[in-house]
Amino acid sequence: MSAVLFFIAAILAISGAIGVVTLRNPFYSVLALVGHLVALAALFLLLRAEFVAAAQVVVYAGAVMVLYVFVVAYVGGGEEYAAGAALRILGPLFALALAVELCIAMLGTGLSGISGKGAPYVLGFGTPRQIGRLFLTDYLFPFEAASLLLLVAAIGAVVLARRRRGLDEEEAADPDFQRRLHQRRPTFTGTMAEGAGLRVAIEEIEQVRAAVTENAPSRPPTGVTE
Amino acid sequence: MAIGWYLTVSALIFCIGASGVLTRRNPLVVLLCLELMLNAANLALVAFARMWGNEAGQIFALIVMVVAACEVTVGLGLIVAIYRRNLPIDVDELHELNG
């Protein structure tokens, strides 16, 4: 029975992984990954890791994948650019070589452990009770480090993806700010021009470009690039 | 099932993920393939935990999940920032830091 379940879950997991890599539309890739994660959770259950399987389904297939779907919907599927010819051949070749190497390593070790079914099952193995006890005793430092890492990642994501809002009329009319806005700089450098709101910046850029081309038609407008 | 079978599945998933990281150019899909590789490592860790009858491998797997979640939030934040600046969402075009 467990062998049948193992093969079903393994085939689903591997086909999900192949789907992630081969599907052209990123949205379908995300859906394939969700299937892959659920199949992997079944494998974890077969390995008596109940808490890890539950965390996999709830945190990974639930929360993280919803985040992915949001971003794919926001960015849009986007046109997929084909990889360079060299990488398109070398990438799968490298993966194949890696697979062969890993299989040789596993078959060649002669470890008696990996051909057995593992240690005898003791009641309570992999339950939340055991995991929680280990997290708060032997593995307290990794636990705290993980919470700190999550905090740093959350702050980093907010800083990276925050909205750069434009200023209101009064702030935009400030002469000192106007002087800084008129300084020549490449566009989209993430400086005050962007902080002032893109629309204002683009209008200013158009004016500057018109003035430059009027005064010196032969010279290309340096510093004002698209 | 013998532990070796789980390790074989884990190795296959890892290699599929590695080939995806190398061949795909959409950073979203590259992140998904990284997830595949991390999950393959998770499967191997849990399989070894079962082999030894010791939960330490499961603790490792949970920590790897935390790291993967952090990587996803920062990576998706970067992709949203790239999109906001109207840059192409393509890892080959984003080579300004390439010396």
Image (tube, rainbow, N blue to C red):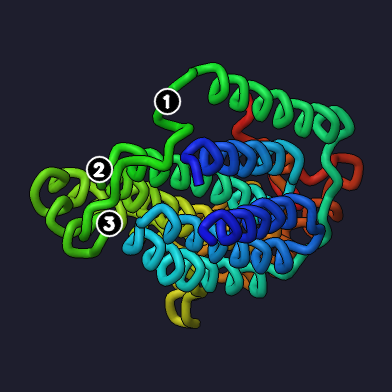
Q: Residue at x 52, y 70 (%)?
A: A67
Whole-Å distance between the Cαs marked 3 and 1?
23 Å
**Disc sitting over residue B54 in the figure:** 2
**Element type where label 1 sits in the image:** loop
Q: Amino acid at mark 3?
A: Gly
Q: How far across and how far down the image is residue A71, in percent?
A: 60, 68
Residue A192 in view of the camera: no
Judged left or right of residue B14, residue A58 is: left
Q: Is residue A105 left or right of residue A59?
A: right
Amino acid marked by disc 2? Asn
Residue under disc 2 on the same chain as residue under disc 1: no
Residue A24's label in the rendered image is: none
Residue at the spot x=31%, y=41% of the render? Answer: A119
Distance in Å between CA atoms under marks 3 and 2: 9 Å
- Report the chain holding disc 2: B
Residue plotted at (12% across, 56% down)? A133
Tell me the residue that label 1 is attached to.
A112
Q: Dot 3 corresponds to which residue?
A: A126
